[in-house]
Image (cartoon, helix red, strand yellow):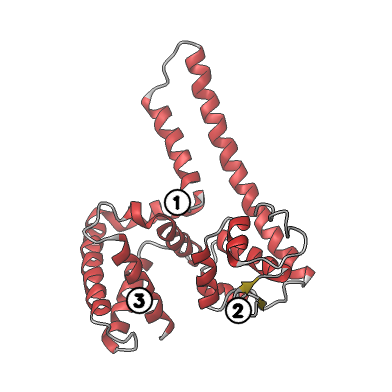
């Protein structure tokens, strides 16, 4: 989070726009948190405008930290049952965040070492070979995506275990499930409908072939949420279609 505006930096309360700007989130995100019951403004003006207090800021910090640690939004509400002023729960949260940041720092330092090695070879008038560039690019990719090195290793191991034929079959099955889900969503089929429940189960069963745990699933969901436009660029559906489909799938899961 960055510093609040000087006009109300110390005490607040803050409007939704002020809070969004100061904390590096969008107004749309804050509206979404309100809609799903994660964060509501503690105060309202006489005309009904939201006003966020210091306690709300502390809750927002906990929400964003839990997201960073890989917890899905659907599970964060339960994790926030402890009061925002509970020092023990806050300390546990900060310790978890610190561990996450330290792991990220280790990755940054590893990339830094690789880049320094490339520079030293150039300084010695020797062009690094392609393998050295490729290994450095792979480490950079770890920083740019949402998976930890261990999660990447787990995913690679699972793909190797499945084999090329089963992976291709899974891709074909996934395309069929996307089309089926878009039909259900387009027809506004109730998520309680047995056919939709069966579709959601089939989707999760397919995903379980590749994701070894909840943290990996959460990382995949976060990666999609942050990069939906880029990830859908080469797909036959728009980012808006797939984002709507993910929301529909989430509703179907909660109705099981």
Please tell me whether mark 2 or mark 3 is closer to you in this view.
2
Marks 2 and 3, Cα distance to the nearest angstrom?
A: 34 Å
Q: Which residue is mark 1?
A: 152
Q: Residue at x 39, y 29 (%)?
A: 131
- Disc 3 crowd rating (10 Å Cα; few below 14, some 14-19, many 20+) is many
Pointer 2 with pointer 3, Cβ within 8 A: no
Q: Position of residue 12 (x, y in %)?
A: 73, 65
Residue closest to the eye, 92 or 24: 24
Q: Residues within 10 Å of mark 1 (few under 14, many from 20)?
A: some
Compared with 55, 235 (above or below) is above
Are circles 1 and 3 on residues that touch, CB within 8 Å?
no
The reply to whether callout 2 and callout 1 are in contact (CB within 8 Å) is no
Residue with the most extreme top position = 125
Q: Residue at x 43, y 61 (%)?
A: 225
Mark 3 residue element = helix
Which residue carries the number 2 mark? Answer: 47
67 displayed left or right of 52: left
Rendered residue at 51%/13% (across/down): 123
Compare residues 24 and 113 and report the one nearer the observer.
24
For marks 2 and 3 on the same chain, the one whose residue lies earlier in the sequence: 2
Measure the C-alpha gap from mark 2 to mark 1. 50 Å
Q: Gap between marks 1 and 3, in whole Å?
A: 28 Å
Q: Where is residue 68 drawn, in percent x and y? A: 57, 59
Seen from the viewer's position, the closer of residues 159 and 227 is 227
SS under mark 1: helix
Q: Secondary structure at mark 2?
A: loop
The mark closer to the camera, 2 or 1, is 2
Q: Residues within 10 Å of mark 2 (few under 14, many from 20)?
A: few
- State the quadrant of the N terminus: bottom right
Residue that mark 3 sits on: 248
């Amino acid at each position: 989070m960055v510093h609040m505006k000087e006009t109300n930096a110390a005490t607040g309360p803050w409007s939704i726009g002020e809070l969004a700007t100061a904390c590096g989130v969008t107004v749309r995100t804050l509206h979404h948190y309100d809609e799903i019951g994660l964060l509501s403004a503690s105060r309202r003006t006489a005309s009904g405008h939201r006003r966020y207090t210091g306690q709300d800021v502390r809750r927002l910090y906990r929400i964003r930290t839990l997201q960073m640690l890989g917890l899905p939004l659907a599970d964060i509400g339960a994790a926030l049952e402890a009061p925002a002023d509970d020092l023990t729960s806050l300390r546990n949260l900060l310790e978890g965040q610190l561990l996450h940041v330290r792991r990220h720092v280790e990755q940054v330092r590893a990339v830094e070492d690789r880049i320094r090695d490339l520079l030293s070879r150039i300084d010695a008038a020797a062009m690094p070979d392609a393998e050295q560039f490729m290994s450095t690019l792979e480490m950079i990719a770890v920083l740019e995506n949402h998976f930890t090195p261990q999660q990447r290793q787990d995913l690679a191991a699972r793909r190797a275990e499945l084999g090329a034929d089963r992976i291709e079959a899974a891709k074909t099955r996934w395309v069929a499930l996307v089309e089926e889900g878009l039909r259900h969503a387009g027809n506004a089929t109730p998520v309680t409908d047995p056919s939709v429940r069966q579709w959601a189960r089939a989707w999760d069963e397919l995903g379980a072939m590749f994701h070894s745990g909840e943290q990996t699933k959460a990382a995949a969901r976060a990666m999609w949420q942050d990069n939906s436009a880029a990830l859908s660029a080469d797909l036959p559906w728009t980012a808006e279609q797939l984002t709507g489909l993910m929301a529909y799938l989430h509703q179907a899961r909660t109705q099981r």
